[in-house]
Image (spheres, rainbow, N blue to C red):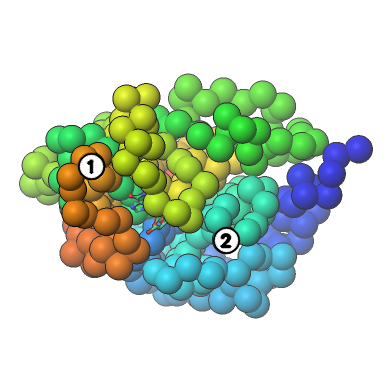
Amino acid sequence: MFPESTTGSCYEECKSTAEWLLAQMEVRPLLGIVCGSGLGGLAEMLKDQVVFRYEDIPNFPQSTVRGHAGRLVFGTLKGKPCVCMQGRFHLYEGYPVQKTTLPMRIFKLLGVEMVILTNAAGGLNEDYKVGDIMIIKDHINMPGFAGVNPLAGQNDERFGVRFPCMSDAYDRDLRQLAQDVGEELGYKDFLREGVYCVLGGPSFETIAECRMLYRLGADAVGMSTVHEVIVARHCGMRVFALSLITNKAVMDYNSEEKANHEEVLQTGKQRAEQLEELVSTMVARIEHNNNSV
Ligand SMILES: O=P(O)(O)O[C@H]1O[C@H](CO)[C@@H](O)[C@H]1O
């Protein structure tokens, strides 16, 4: 038998939560959004909001991190029906990895077809500046190397296959759309595309770790997103993800800089407006580009 901790997002549990939510409102979301640290403002853009606090939703984990409000917001963004997580769950909060990703399966059972995820991340690439927005083209699942994968445990075929492909995790058409929209909005100077590496946190990386991750091919480092992406892809949702580079990873032993959550939240505030504009313009365009949601 599989151990208890690996059965954290079983079909029945997700279904009963999805049905509970659907029974209380008219919105039938096709698009799911996850807001990163300090980036919850995206949820405020939704019109005709129906809001649930995480603590009131059956089976839902609770947000414990500053910058993650802990609200599930339904509504429309540029006329498209959406559900938006204002606050996500991280491994370091003590949840099993299956529980941190449970909302992705609930999204699927709500009818969501496409997920847009945002996060705050440290920039490893030497060309990156604080405030850059990085379109994620691929990831490195560092906890996965040690067996921490949200799909570990018994596979439920109602969600997806035992061995899902991840080489196409980040939708190419949506990445191109982001590039096009970013260029039109005049964001070219701070719009990047790169590889995101997830670590378990909550301690920030050492200098040696940052150097190693960069050499391994990562452009940015954080403590989220990848596990959500794996679960979203497993159950067949399209994925687009963005990192806001909130701080530069420290790579130099002479540096006086120290990574800290205050700076992460502060940078989020400074770039929030542009990030929201990029996402909402993309959402408005999705049909025009034949990427129907
Ligand atoms: O990835 P999000 O949720 O944006 O948060 C990032 O910011 C926090 C560190 O400041 C970590 O949780 C890291 O993962």
Seen in the picture, residue 204 relative to 136 is either above or below; the reply is below
Q: Residue at x 60, y 69 (%)?
A: 62
Q: CA distance from mark 2 to mark 1?
A: 30 Å
**Mark 1: secondary structure:** loop
Q: 77 above or below 123? A: below
Between 258 and 284, the one nearer to me in the picture: 258
- Residue drawn where x is 67% and y is 48% of the image: 98
Query: Going from the N terminus, do you reach mark 2 or mark 1 first?
Result: 2
Viewer-nearest residue: 210 or 292 = 210
Is any part of residue 219 visible from this angle? yes
The amino acid pointed to by label 2 is Glu
Rendering coords of residue 228 (x, y %): 54, 45
In the picture, measured across the screen, residue 143 lies left or right of residue 278, that is right
Residue 279: assigned label: none
- For disc 1, the marked residue is 253
Instruction: Note whether ligand 1 is within 8 Å of mark 2.
Output: no
Query: Disc 2 vs disc 1: which is toward the camera?
Result: 1
Q: Residue 148's spot in the image, x, y percent?
A: 63, 38
In terms of secondary structure, where does tag 2 sit? helix
| Picture quarter with the C terminus | top left
Quadrant assignment for ligand 1: bottom left
Where residue 130 sits in the image (x, y, percent)? 18, 51
Label 1 crowd (10 A; few <14 / some 14-19 / many >=20): few
**How many residues crowd mark 2 within 10 Å: few (<14), some (14–19), many (20+)?**
some
Task: Return the residue at label 2.
Answer: 93
Look at label 1 and name its amino acid.
Answer: Tyr
